[in-house]
Amino acid sequence: MFPSLPAYLRERKISADIRTLLLLRKAMDKGLVKTVGDLYAVLKGLTVKQPEDVGPFTAGFYSYFLNIHVNNGESLDQAILRSDSFLEWMEQRNNFIDEEEELPDVPQLIEEYLDE
C-alpha cells in the first residue's frame, strides 16, 4: 500500500516514514478513509506539522495520487483543469449526462471531480 509515498513526500520536505503508512493503514482499517478527500485529510493530519508545509504537501498529494502536477505560481484549480485525469473524467462524465443538462460552473466541476 503506497510503499513509495514516504520517500515521495520527503522529496518535498514533508516529514513521512513507515509510521505514516502504518497510521494510514489503521485509519483505513477503521473506515476513516472512504474517498480521496478523506485520504487527503488523514495524510495531511499525519504529516503536516507547520502551516508552511500545507502547500508542498498538497502539491505532492495531488501529484502522487491523481497525477496532477502544480507548477510554481499556479493554483490547484488551474493544475486540475489542465490535468489528463480531469480531462478523462470529464469525457467519462459527458458520456453519462443528458445532452440537454446544463453543465455546472468550473468550481462545481472541480469539486465534483475531487469528490468522485
Image: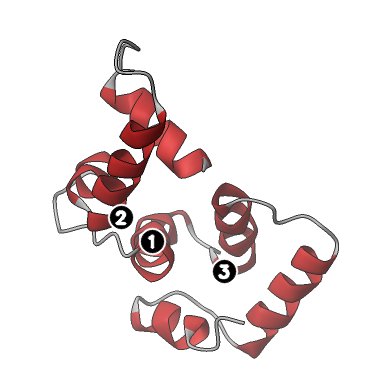
Q: Residues within 10 Å of mark 3 (few under 14, many from 20)?
A: some
Give x and y (percent) for residue 64: 39, 70
Left/right placement of residue 105 relative to residue 73 reads: right
User: Which amino acid type is marked by label 1?
Assistant: Leu
- Which sits earlier in the primary sequence, circle 2 or circle 1? 1
Q: Quadrant of residue 21?
A: bottom right
> Which circle marks residue 85 in the picture?
2
Pair 2/1: label in front: 2
Where is mark 1, residue-wise? 66
- Which sits earlier in the primary sequence, circle 3 or circle 1? 3
User: Which amino acid type is marked by label 2?
Assistant: Ser
User: Which amino acid type is marked by label 3?
Assistant: Thr
Q: What residue appears at the point 24 percent right and 47 percent down from the top-left corner?
A: 87
Contact between labelled residues 1 and 2, with CB atoms less than 8 Å apart: yes
* Placement of 12 over or under 41, stated as above or below: below
Where is mark 3, residue-wise? 47
Between 45 and 92, the one lying in front of the other is: 92
- Which sits earlier in the primary sequence, circle 2 or circle 3? 3
**Mark 1: secondary structure:** helix
